[in-house]
């Protein structure tokens, strides 16, 4: 024996001397002094040279010299140049032939082994198999080089990204300012987009594994690593609304929509066929922060009754089907109101300026009139295209004060609205007057919350809008105009009559209300106690209202509707999707800020009351927030609907939409009240 051989293990080459056999395996001593048994098919080269020394140290020294010489010879071999020379001359080569081609006729076993090492290590231009070297086809080589380049780019990008991330997180010790080119702009731009994608989509992101590798390479472990990195980089804020990205809600308008809005901004009022109502005392009633004023009201004595007017800014015919503004409105479906901002359905140059019912400005309107008796019965009604002039802008607080003034017309209007609601309740309506949790966030991120009961002014305006919407629905139905109707079937159960003021009962009844529907048939709306219903009073903020206004205005002008039933049916899926996305984003964002507020109360106990209980859990409602929470069932503890209790805030994570509470220990701790 004593023959010098070479084998490959874990991508490393070993020179060895064969000292015998054990069964079908060779007994080898490697140049590193390791004795192993190896099948013959594991050998990549068998040398003509033999080492006949008996002394182990001499054998190892000789093996190490051979190993080092072959590595040195390999350095002088340019595999790409060799492949370029012989690629056309034949596919299969013996190692000795290639060795002679590179090193000349005097090539020996060490040269052969060097060639084999170079081929295997480079592994692109040649393939070594069963003692022969195969030249790869040109297309295979090009593909392999391309893959290598991609991998090299990936590793370079990963290395740069890792250094960037470590710098963001302050992992590395402070160092002198690095050269400007240390973090290539395009590389960082790539990682920012990858981090965004992972922060938004989580494990479903196509970049998820790549970003995991980035953080593993950087030695950073954090549950919100992608999000926090973007905050540290100044790309996002700590309270970034990721749900806008998840639900595909665009905040900015496309350029073609902006340009379309600019053309409409100076569009003059079309006075043709409009009734001049500029002498009528018309007022708007909204919150002080509202800028998109699309509805106004009036009240005049007419004989033994009162004529109630609801006047809606008439914009429908200015936005024909298929125009950029129309398409964008259908896609958005509604204005989205969030605690810290709003995302308008129409550009604000129109919704808050040119088409808003500002006091002192003449505006085109669609006016709904109902003559109501002193008993609250609608005697007659009409709809007309009009020109109005809002005399005064009022807030709800202004209107509330007027309702309580002696002999003020709003006293009468409020009374009439009470009688109209009572009539609807007798027909099965369930108004459910539950206070609204109002959440506001200022520019510094400070959260304020309060429960806002439905006061007399808000009730009065709401009932006026319900009246106008009902008149619109009946007009559309009675004139066979294609329309979108809102309907609602009977609740799953009735536990109140509709006139109850008890918040707990109304809250419980709301859980039993059937889901409303939007469709082309004028089905009853049981929740409102009406035979048919649509919405038309907010065309600046809801596209359904805009569409229904277009139908009625077009019919009044030329006797034909703007949209066919097929048109409305085609819009419907987009509208429903837009409304669902807007509702989800609004709900999640409001809850985020509520949870952010509740996080400051962690460890405190707060008031709650029992809504429901089951075999494993109890549902309670936080009294100051009207938010349902789950509590563990306590064996032996008697629980009844409406029972007052206290719960302790245990864990809150706004970004994960997580709120955990438990029964408060006694005596209960005092809790801060919500910020007024």
Image: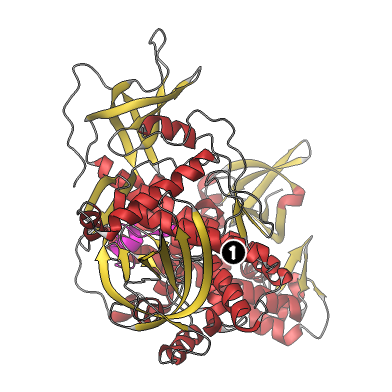
The image quarter containing residue 199 is bottom left
**Is residue 75 within the magenta segment?**
no
Q: Is residue 25 left or right of residue 238?
A: right
Q: Residue at x 66, y 80 (%)?
A: 559
The residue indicated by pointer 1 is: 575
**Is residue 240 within the magenta segment?**
yes
Q: Residue at x 48, y 52 (%)?
A: 377
Q: Which residues are magenta?
A: 228-243
Q: Is residue 122 left or right of residue 240?
A: right
Nearest to the observer: residue 4 or residue 651: 651
Q: Position of residue 291 (x, y in %)?
A: 32, 71
Q: Position of residue 217 (x, y in %)?
A: 41, 56
Nearest to the observer: residue 185 or residue 160: 185
Residue 247 visible here: no
Rendered view: 130 above or below 176: above
Nearest to the observer: residue 123 or residue 385: 385
């Amino acid at each position: 024996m004593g023959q010098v051989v070479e084998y490959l293990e874990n991508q490393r080459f070993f020179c060895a001397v064969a000292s015998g056999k054990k069964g079908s395996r060779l007994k080898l001593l490697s140049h590193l002094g390791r004795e192993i048994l190896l099948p013959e098919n594991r050998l990549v080269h068998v040398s003509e040279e033999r080492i006949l020394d008996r002394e182990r140290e001499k054998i190892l020294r000789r093996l190490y010299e051979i190993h080092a010489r072959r590595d040195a010879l390999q350095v002088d071999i340019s595999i790409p140049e060799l492949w370029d020379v012989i690629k056309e001359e034949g596919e299969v080569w013996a190692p000795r032939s290639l060795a002679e081609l590179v090193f000349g006729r005097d090539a020996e076993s060490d040269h052969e082994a060097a060639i084999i090492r170079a081929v295997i290590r480079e592994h692109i231009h040649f393939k070594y198999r069963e003692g022969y070297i195969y030249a790869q086809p040109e297309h295979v080589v090009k593909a392999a080089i391309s893959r290598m380049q991609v991998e090299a780019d990936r590793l370079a990008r990963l290395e740069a990204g890792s250094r960037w991330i470590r710098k963001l997180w302050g992992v590395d010790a402070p160092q002198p300012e690095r050269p400007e080119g240390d973090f290539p702009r395009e590389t960082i731009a790539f990682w920012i987009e990858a981090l965004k994608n992972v922060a938004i989509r989580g494990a479903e992101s196509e970049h998820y594994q790549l970003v995991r590798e980035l953080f593993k390479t950087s030695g950073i472990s954090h549950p919100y690593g992608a999000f926090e990195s973007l905050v540290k980089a100044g790309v996002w804020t700590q309270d970034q609304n990721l749900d806008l990205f998840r639900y595909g809600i665009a905040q900015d308008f496309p350029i073609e929509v902006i340009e379309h809005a600019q053309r409409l901004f100076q569009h003059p009022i079309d006075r043709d066929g409009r009734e001049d109502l500029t002498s009528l005392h018309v007022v708007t009633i909204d919150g002080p922060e509202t800028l998109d004023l699309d509805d106004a009201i009036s009240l005049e004595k007419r004989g033994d009754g009162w004529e109630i007017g609801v006047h809606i800014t008439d914009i429908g015919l200015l936005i024909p089907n298929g125009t950029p503004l129309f398409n964008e409105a259908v896609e958005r479906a509604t204005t989205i109101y969030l605690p810290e901002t709003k995302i308008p359905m129409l550009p604000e140059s129109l919704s808050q300026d040119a088409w808003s019912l500002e006091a002192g400005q003449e505006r085109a309107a669609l006016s709904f009139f109902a003559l109501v008796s002193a008993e609250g019965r609608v005697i007659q009604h009409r709809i007309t295209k009009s020109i109005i002039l809002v005399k005064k802008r009022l807030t709800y607080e202004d209107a509330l004060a007027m309702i309580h003034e002696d002999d003020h017309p709003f006293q009468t209007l409020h009374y009439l609205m009470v009688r109209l609601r009572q009539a609807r309740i007798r027909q099965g309506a369930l108004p459910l007057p539950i206070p609204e949790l109002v959440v506001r966030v200022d520019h510094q991120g400070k959260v304020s919350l309060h429960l806002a009961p439905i006061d007399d002014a808000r009730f009065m305006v709401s009932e006026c809008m319900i009246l106008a919407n009902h008149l619109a629905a009946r007009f559309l139905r009675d004139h066979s105009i294609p329309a979108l109707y809102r309907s609602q079937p009977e609740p799953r159960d009735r536990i109140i009559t509709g006139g109850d003021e008890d918040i707990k009962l109304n809250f419980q009844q709301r859980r039993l209300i059937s889901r409303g529907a939007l469709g082309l048939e004028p089905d009853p709306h049981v929740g409102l106690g009406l035979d048919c219903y649509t919405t038309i009073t907010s065309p600046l903020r809801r596209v359904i209202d805009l569409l229904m206004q277009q139908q009625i205005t077009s019919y009044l002008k030329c006797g034909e509707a703007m949209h066919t039933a097929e048109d409305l049916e085609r819009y419907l899926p987009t509208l429903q999707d837009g409304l669902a996305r807007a509702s989800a984003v609004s709900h999640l964002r409001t809850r985020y800020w509520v949870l952010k507020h509740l996080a400051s109360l962690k460890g405190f106990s707060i008031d709650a009351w029992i809504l429901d209980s089951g075999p494993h859990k109890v549902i309670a409602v936080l009294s100051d927030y009207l938010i349902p929470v789950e509590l563990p069932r306590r064996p032996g503890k008697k629980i009844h609907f409406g029972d007052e209790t206290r719960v302790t805030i245990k864990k809150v994570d706004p970004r994960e939409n997580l709120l955990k509470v438990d029964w408060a220990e006694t005596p209960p701790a005092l809790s801060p009240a919500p910020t007024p």
